[in-house]
Image (cartoon, rainbow, N blue to C red):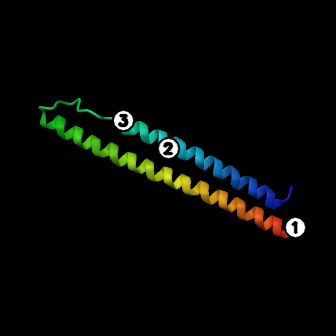
Amino acid sequence: MSELRYLREVWLKRAEVAKECAGELEGLRAKLDGVVTRNYFGDGCLEGIELFERLQLLVKSGSQDLGVARDSALDLGAASAAASDSIESADANAIR
């Protein structure tokens, strides 16, 4: 097997793993969005209301971070697939 063909397979594997990672991050983000959806700390309690609002902000921030990480994984997957295509093209041109 040529070195370029081997590298192409490695980049394809990286693309596959990045897509899997993006899917897992999206699943985690969706689960996190479901956390602290209602105030269990007391509607009439100022401390409970404050705690609930702060937890909601924290969850929203974490969810956004997971979304950014998911997008980065998708970008990495696309870049890895493009690298694989580039290597395949270089390999084909070298044979000519």
Question: Residue at label 3?
Answer: 34
Q: Is residue 74 above or below residue 36?
A: below
Q: Nearer the viewer, mark 1 or mark 2?
A: 1
Residue 74 lies, in percent from the top left, at 55, 53
SS at mark 1 in the image? helix
Q: Amino acid at mark 2?
A: Leu
Give residue 83's quadrant in the image.
bottom right
82 sits to left or right of 1: left
Q: Residues within 10 Å of mark 2 (few under 14, many from 20)?
A: many
Q: How many numbered circles are shown?
A: 3
At 78% from the left and 67% from the top, the residue drawn is 90
User: Can you identify the residue that label 1 sits on?
Assistant: 95
Residues under labels 1 and 2: Cα distance? 41 Å
Q: CA distance from mark 3 to mark 1?
A: 54 Å
User: Who comes first in sequence, dot 1 or dot 2?
Assistant: 2
Q: In the image, residue 21 lies at what x, y percent?
A: 56, 45
Tag 3: amino acid? Gly
The percent coordinates of residue 93 (x first, y second) are 82, 69
Lower position in the chain sequence, tag 3 or tag 1: 3
Question: What's the residue at 28%, 40% (across, down)?
Answer: 55
Q: Quote the CA–CA distance across marks 2 and 3.
A: 15 Å
Label number found at residue 25: 2
Instruction: Please report the residue visible at 54 percent of the width from the left and 43 percent of the height from the top.
Output: 23
Q: Residues within 10 Å of mark 1 (few under 14, many from 20)?
A: few
* The image quarter in which residue 75 lies: bottom right
SS under mark 3: loop
Q: Amino acid at mark 1?
A: Ile
Q: Quadrant of the N terminus?
A: bottom right
Residue 19 at what x, y percent from top left?
Answer: 59, 48
Q: Quadrant of the C terminus?
A: bottom right
